[in-house]
Image (cartoon, grey):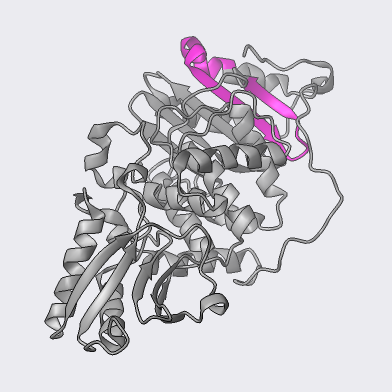
Amino acid sequence: MKSLGFSLALLLPLAAQTVRAEGLPLIAPPPPETEQPLPTLQPGRPCPALAEALRADLGAEARVWSVTVLNSDGDILGDVNGGVPRIPASNQKLISTAFALDRLGPDFRLKTRLIQRPDGSLELNGEGDPDLGIAGLQRFAMAALRQGGSMGGSPLDVKLMVREEPRANWWPADWHPADRGYAYGAPITRLALTSNAVGGAVSDPYNRLQVLFRKEVSRRGGSVSIERGQPMAEPLSMDDDNSVVLHEEASAPMHALLSLANTESHNFTAEVLMRQASGLWDVNAASRATERWMFEQGLPIQGLRVADGSGLSRNNRVTSRTIAALLMRMDQHPFAPYYQASMAIAGQRGTLRNLYRGTILDGKFRGKTGTISGVRSISGFLQTQDGPRYVAMISNGSSYPNTVMGQILRSVQRFSPCPSSDAAEMQPDVPG
């Protein structure tokens, strides 16, 4: 869950190589139109051997776990408490990143712009680029000084309006106050230098931006007066009022932003992507839009409650069946390779780099981890000799979750294909 101060400049080449390895160009075509229905969950075709193994792996802790295993036909091969909504921690990012990829596409970039209005006034607008840094701010300062702040004013006297979210929108209201001091709980703002984190969280990012902008202008012999304005309700149209973009900084493309959110579990990025996909920076409204999108995908959303985009909120609720079905849905998506490429890889990279190294799971499992106090989750795509398995595991209160998760992934690998010939006649183990 914690921010690592990770730079997208370092992550972009890795994401590009991964997508190329899947045989796709970096610029993907729009999703093709299709009338082929997506597979739905098939509860009547389980794998009894796997179901028995899951019960053995969970043992006395079964009541605090939810586990669901699907194949690409939607068969529920194994399910324990799969219909029980639980706190997912960072598995919540699987939802927000899928939403963003579907709505915005793999080449979308977050923009930060310095705009000159027809009356000569300057405005700074942003969309929450997580990798905007001091060098970008310096370029904005130079562009402002070159143009000046008003028609007929001194070119070294800059008047600037900074459009930013009100403080009430900086954090989801249910984030614990103690988390807000750490980098992983940094405030979510449109103009965020270094993701609003310098060691810990920046408590007042608007003030920090003002101070640093004034410093850069002053260092170049100018002065600046800064006024705060509310974000615009609609995106700026340059054609309507003859406004001019003096300078623009663009983020890395979406497929790299997805990797930052999922591979490194970067909370700030996941929150921004959910807001941008919904077009709503109020987290409650963006959360409702995300829930609507999940419903539109035809997913089983009983018990779903979206409270934020990152999973830091303890008010999130989701079932393992919902997560497993979402993974299956995204594996059928036109942008499926980008979604899979955004995941950590067992034994190799991201939050899974130190797990399962040197085992049969090494390099075979792409997924997303989740950790907050009392909560441990892991969900993703497991390569088996019988095709992909979509595995979702959430524990709320396990005493030894890492051990159990490794055992379950090995069981899924071991019983693939299912050795039972009478699987179709059995009913799944679904206590929840």
Work out which quarter of the rendered image holds the N terminus and state it: top left
Magenta-colored stretch includes residue 296: no
Above or below residue 103? Residue 57 is above
The reply to whether residue 407 is in sight is yes
In percent of width and height, residue 140 lies at 30, 77
Q: Magenta span covers which residues?
A: 55-79
| Res 396 quadrant in image | top left
Q: Residue at x 65, y 19 (%)?
A: 51
Residue shown at 55% from the left, 15% from the top: 56
Residue depicted at x 18% and y 68%: 212
Which quadrant is home to the C terminus?
top right
| x and y percentages locating residue 410 in the rendered image | 55, 32
Above or below, comparing residue 5 to residue 51 in the picture:
below
Horizontal side, residue 45 vs residue 242: left or right = right
In-front residue for pair 299/49: 299
Q: Which is more toward the observer, 377 or 296?
A: 296
